[in-house]
């Protein structure tokens, strides 16, 4: 039994990057205020001292240039992890992500294995440009992968997978969870969570709630309350990865419960829930 | 021996079709690969198109002037050896096969002459269109240089369908314009420059039938393509739609052509508009003017002393205002599905100026509030302004009912066109002595000599029914025949 | 530069022009997929600047810089495959023009939103810097492209991070149908560089030796770790934006003026007058090039178009993740659908 240590969601993200940078010299970080300042949320505090300015690069406020440089570096075999200070600021880099990174392998055969990570989500009293969930903007773009962890363990394990992944991955960290989620994680064990696999957060046979990110906890709380009130058992599926979408897990659960409820934070219209209910893949499986 | 397809290239992402403007080779000619084979013209650009293979031009499938979809096969080249004919872009060949335009035959010159139409008469419409003499530039045979036009002229008349359509809309003959396109072809820019530079009044009649506008087949065109074609009227009929081609006008020797001036253009627009909007009906009544004639004779001098010429007009205007007050529907206008009853009575008085060449309708505002004197002086003033062309914009605005005097030149009565957006117009005929049946003081019917006039009221049947029109006319008649002494 | 190098330079320009002329013929014969964007009149800038690079250096062209690609070792046939979208093309028929990436030759392709390839090339330069390699990067942008947000961010990023980068601003006077004076209020485009705090050289882009000389200086600067240099090449786009553009907005006399400054004709005159080549030799070179290109074109056109199934490949590294084809009807899916209904109800 390995030693356990209480780890926050934020620390889990730090650890993932730290461990990857330790074991793989091609991993490097770039973003705004990530070096000396240590990142707006202090996710990268101490990285500059440990890894030096060549691998922890403070950039101008230029999201397109950040992502562009990440793509070029990825072409050269490096593994860039680009930080968007808030995921809302990914908008200026939209062109680079959608037209360059996502289509690079498809058009030219040369992939762009990079990670773009940043804090998403509301509930932090942060206003309209520091609270958004942007997954739907990118859900339509083939060639991208999207991750939205809810637990510290997943944040760590999924980020390590994302860094190792040969395709561009958007990694949505929920800022509400950064310091609220604390889990005992093994110190010695290498935590790796594969992309594209959902997790049953709470088992049940009466209703399936499909959700991700901070809403996993809302769904869990609701499930407990329902169980207490009338005994019904709600199953909560944490998608963890939005693309590729683990449709098998959803179908399996819904086959058992016969009922499906989808919960997400972002706008409903044109939102990710529509994709989950899309008959296109329901038919395909 | 194999045949290589020659296709209409796509000269831009959005280009869907191209016009083959000129063949540089004839069937049977030897052609080198990459040697220019034909010229095309598209919405965006003109170009010479090189042959895809060396060989003999075996078939020409698209004639000069025809417009076909991109990737349509326009010709076939017979190659002598095993020159990779099969290897020529297979996907293109496939697309070409699917293109319907390939089968399109060149349009026959000047369509088929209409049978047994000896003289071009204005109607029936379709027949006239067909009987129009063929325009010289209408599709000479490809390669035939001996048509009525020289080769150079023929080339100059070549242009894109867009340009031809534009030219037709502006009544310009392509051949009048100096082209700057390939081989002197007329481009859109050339046409626009020409339109901008030409002196006013220089417009020619539009050609009656152009290659791009085939004569309409008289008959029903159910779900026919939308006709943005100039000179074609789309008329819905029971269960179908009829495209009626309004024939162009052929200018004959000795004809004089003159550009309409602005007033004439506006009048044309205004009259056509009214005929399209309103459901016109005309009712006519006959009015005994004896009483008014006597009154006028009595008052003329008095008015003249005040510098006012008293005509029958003010009497009629007075009667009309009485009629409108009694039947306000005649003083209304239609707005969508609503009827707007006008709050004032503003009488439009049609005045002919320039020896009858122009018509203008000054408006006498609030006529119901004016005495006979007021009406007379107001009308005089407006008529004078009209004749001296010093009417203000305000003087011709806001009419709610119009009176037009068709009798001023001696006519019995007229059926005028409603002056939009009004719903009625009164046409007053000549006031003249007529033998009429009257009763003598003993109550016997006798033939008498009276001043009489026919009044024709044209009205918009959308809101004014015949009965209401009759009531109104009767009221006018009643006022005029029993015109009060007082208040004049 | 030696005599043979001068002739090589001349040949690359001929290859560029001959290939573009061949592409124009192919375009009109219906073989080209997408637009054809010619570089007539500005071949000298791309060719001569690329000539200053060395093995291992990287280059990101713009749409009108295919001459630079040939200098970097690209077989002209690859360009023909790109434009005809053959299955054998570097993009496997999925993209066209210069939009391809060949790591072996150090080439990063641009994409249609302009200025973006600079941002990506910055990453390549960054990797050289991180790894302590003495390689440099060079990219191109028309003055129109230099006005995008990506261009600005990219230029600033390269300048601030002192990347080994050469940015050639091809001042060719036209951005599609818009004159350069409507693209920027700066009068002298070298002033743009000042805003980024980097040195800038202004060259006659139609004088290949001047372009070459300045680029050699800029490359040396980048290679010794002194950061980015901009080069503003004064040149002219002698044809419309693409084949659909008849360039009617360009005054004829302006074209005439620039036609006299044609980079190939000027360079050939120089070669003959300086005794580096005989006129006949140059004519023979041109004919040989045109013949080679014509033969290459014939062979490429005969190559097969991409297979339809190719459209679903290379979306992700893991081919199994390719999105399903929605129009493919699979019977088992419908059978499965029948089974897909609630099996439990809660009392």
Image (cartoon, coloured by chain):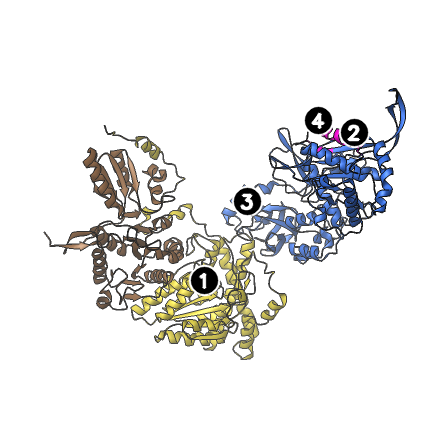
User: Which residue of the protein is positioned furthest toward the front in this rendering?
Assistant: B486
Magenta run includes residue B461: yes
The kind of secondary structure element at disc 4 is helix
Magenta run includes residue B444: no
- Circle nearer the N terminus (2, 4): 2
Q: Which residue is mark 1?
A: C148
Q: Which residue is mark 4?
A: B467
Q: Which residue is mark 2?
A: B285
Neighbour tally class for label 1: few under 14, some 14-19, many 20 plus, Cα within 10 Å: some
Q: Which residue is mark 3?
A: B96
Subunit ID for the residue under disc 3: B
Q: Is residue B205 left or right of residue A81?
A: right
The kind of secondary structure element at disc 2 is strand
The yellow-coloured chain is labelled C
The residue range painted magenta reads B458-484
- Return the x and y of residue C158 as percentages of the image width and height: 37, 68
Q: Given contact means CB atoms under 8 Å apart, are the residues at marks 2 and 4 in contact?
A: no
Distance between mark 1 and mark 3 Cα atoms: 40 Å
Subunit ID for the residue under disc 4: B
Distance between mark 2 and mark 4 Cα atoms: 13 Å
The brown-coloured chain is labelled A
């Amino acid at each position: 039994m390995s030693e356990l240590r209480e780890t926050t969601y934020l620390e889990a993200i730090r650890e993932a990057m730290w461990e990857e940078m330790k074991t793989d010299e091609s991993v490097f970080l770039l973003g705004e205020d990530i070096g000396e300042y240590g990142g707006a949320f202090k996710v990268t505090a101490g990285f500059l001292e440990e890894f030096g300015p060549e691998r922890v690069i403070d950039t101008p406020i230029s999201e397109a240039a950040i992502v562009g440089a990440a793509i070029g570096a990825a072409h050269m075999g490096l593994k860039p992890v680009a930080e968007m200070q808030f995921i809302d600021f990914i908008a200026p880099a939209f062109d680079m992500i959608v037209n360059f990174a996502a289509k690079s392998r498809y058009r030219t055969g040369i992939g762009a294995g990079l990670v773009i990570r940043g804090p998403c989500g509301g509930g932090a009293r942060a206003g309209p440009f520091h609270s958004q969930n942007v997954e739907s903007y990118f859900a339509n773009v083939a060639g991208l992968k999207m991750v939205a962890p809810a637990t510290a363990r997943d944040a760590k394990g999924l980020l390590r997978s994302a860094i190792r992944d040969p395709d561009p991955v958007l990694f949505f960290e929920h800022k509400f969870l950064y310091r609220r989620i604390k889990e005992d994680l093994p110190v010695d064990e290498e935590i790796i969570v594969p992309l594209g696999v959902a997790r049953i957060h709470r088992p049940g046979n009466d209703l399936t709630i499909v959700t991700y990110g901070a809403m996993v906890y809302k769904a869990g709380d609701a499930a407990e309350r329902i169980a207490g009130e009338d005994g019904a058992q709600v199953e909560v599926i944490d998608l963890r990865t939005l693309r590729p979408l683990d449709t098998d897990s959803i179908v399996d659960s819904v086959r058992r419960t016969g009922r499906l409820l989808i919960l997400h934070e972002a706008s409903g219209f044109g939102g990710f829930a529509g994709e989950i209910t899309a008959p296109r893949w329901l038919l395909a499986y | 021996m194999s045949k290589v397809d020659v296709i209409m290239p796509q000269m831009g992402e959005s280009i869907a079709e191209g016009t083959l403007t000129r063949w540089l080779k004839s069937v049977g000619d030897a052609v080198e690969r990459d040697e220019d084979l034909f010229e095309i013209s598209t919405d965006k650009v003109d170009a010479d198109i090189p042959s895809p293979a060396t060989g003999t031009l075996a078939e020409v499938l698209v004639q000069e002037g025809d417009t076909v979809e991109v990737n349509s096969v326009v010709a076939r080249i017979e190659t002598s050896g095993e020159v990779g004919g099969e290897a020529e872009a297979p996907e293109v060949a496939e697309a070409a096969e699917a293109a319907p335009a390939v089968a399109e035959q060149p349009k026959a010159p000047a369509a088929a002459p209409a049978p047994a139409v000896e003289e071009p008469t204005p109607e029936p419409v379709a027949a006239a269109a067909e009987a129009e003499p063929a325009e010289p530039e209408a599709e000479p045979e490809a390669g035939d240089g001996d048509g009525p036009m020289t080769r150079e002229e023929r080339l100059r008349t070549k242009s894109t369908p867009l340009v031809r359509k534009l030219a037709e809309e502006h009544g310009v003959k392509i051949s009048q314009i100096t082209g700057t396109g390939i081989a002197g072809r007329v481009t859109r820019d050339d046409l626009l420059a020409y339109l901008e530079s030409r002196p006013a009044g220089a417009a020619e009649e539009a050609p009656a039938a152009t290659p791009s506008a085939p004569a309409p087949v008289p008959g029903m065109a159910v779900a026919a393509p939308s006709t943005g074609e100039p000179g074609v009227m789309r008329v819905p009929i029971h269960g179908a739609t009829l495209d009626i081609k309004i024939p162009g006008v052929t200018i004959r020797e000795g004809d004089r052509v003159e550009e309409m001036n602005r007033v004439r253009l506006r009048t044309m627009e205004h009259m056509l508009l009214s005929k399209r909007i309103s459901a016109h009906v005309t009712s006519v009544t006959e009015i005994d003017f004896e009483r008014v004639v006597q009154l006028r004779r009595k008052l003329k001098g008095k008015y003249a002393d005040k510098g006012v010429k008293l005509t029958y007009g003010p009497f009629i205007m007075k009667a009309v205002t009485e009629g409108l007050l009694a039947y306000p529907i005649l003083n209304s206008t239609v707005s969508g599905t609503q009827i707007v009853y006008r709050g004032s009575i503003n009488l439009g008085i049609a005045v002919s100026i320039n020896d009858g060449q122009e018509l203008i309708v000054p408006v006498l505002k609030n006529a119901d509030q004016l005495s006979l004197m007021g009406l007379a002086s107001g009308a005089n003033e407006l008529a004078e302004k009209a004749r001296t062309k010093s009417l203000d914009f305000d003087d011709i605005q806001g009419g709610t009912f119009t009176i037009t005097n068709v009798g001023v030149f001696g006519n019995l009565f007229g059926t005028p066109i409603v002056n939009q957006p009004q719903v009625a117009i009164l046409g007053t005929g000549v006031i003249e002595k007529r033998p009429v049946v009257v009763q003598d003081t003993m109550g016997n019917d006798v033939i008498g000599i009276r001043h009489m006039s026919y009044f024709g009221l044209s009205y918009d049947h959308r809101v004014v029914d015949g009965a209401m029109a009759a009531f109104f006319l009767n009221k006018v008649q009643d006022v005029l025949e029993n015109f009060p002494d007082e208040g004049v | 530069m030696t005599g043979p190098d001068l002739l090589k330079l001349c040949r690359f320009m001929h290859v560029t022009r001959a290939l573009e002329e061949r592409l124009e013929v192919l375009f009109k014969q219906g073989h080209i997929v997408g637009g054809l964007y010619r570089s007539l009149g500005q071949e000298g800038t791309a060719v001569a600047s690329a000539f200053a690079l060395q093995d291992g250096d990287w280059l990101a062209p713009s749409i009108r810089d295919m001459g630079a690609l040939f200098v970097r070792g690209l077989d002209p046939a690859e360009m023909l495959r790109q434009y005809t979208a053959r299955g054998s093309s570097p993009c496997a028929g999925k993209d066209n023009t210069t939009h391809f990436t060949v790591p072996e030759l150090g080439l990063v392709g641009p994409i249609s939103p302009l200025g973006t390839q600079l941002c990506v090339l910055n990453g390549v330069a960054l990797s050289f810097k991180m790894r302590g390699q003495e390689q440099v990067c060079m990219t191109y942008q028309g003055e129109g492209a230099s006005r995008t947000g990506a261009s600005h961010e990219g230029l600033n990023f390269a300048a601030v991070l002192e990347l080994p980068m050469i940015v050639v601003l091809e001042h060719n006077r036209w951005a599609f149908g818009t004159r350069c004076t409507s693209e920027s209020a700066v009068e002298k485009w070298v002033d743009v560089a000042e805003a980024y705090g980097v040195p800038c050289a202004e060259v006659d882009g139609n004088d290949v030796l001047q372009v070459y000389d300045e680029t050699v200086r800029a490359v040396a600067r980048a290679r010794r770790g002194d950061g980015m240099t901009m080069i503003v090449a004064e040149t002219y786009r002698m044809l419309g934006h693409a084949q659909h553009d008849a360039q009617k907005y360009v005054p004829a006399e302006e074209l005439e003026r620039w036609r006299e400054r044609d980079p190939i004709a000027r360079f050939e005159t120089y070669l003959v007058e300086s005794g580096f080549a005989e006129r006949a030799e140059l004519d023979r070179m041109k004919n040989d090039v045109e013949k080679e290109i014509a033969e290459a074109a014939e062979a490429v056109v005969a190559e097969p178009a991409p297979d339809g199934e190719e459209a679903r490949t290379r979306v992700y590294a893991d081919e199994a993740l390719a999105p399903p084809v929605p129009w493919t009807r699979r019977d088992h899916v419908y059978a499965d659908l029948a089974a897909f209904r609630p099996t439990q109800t809660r009392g």
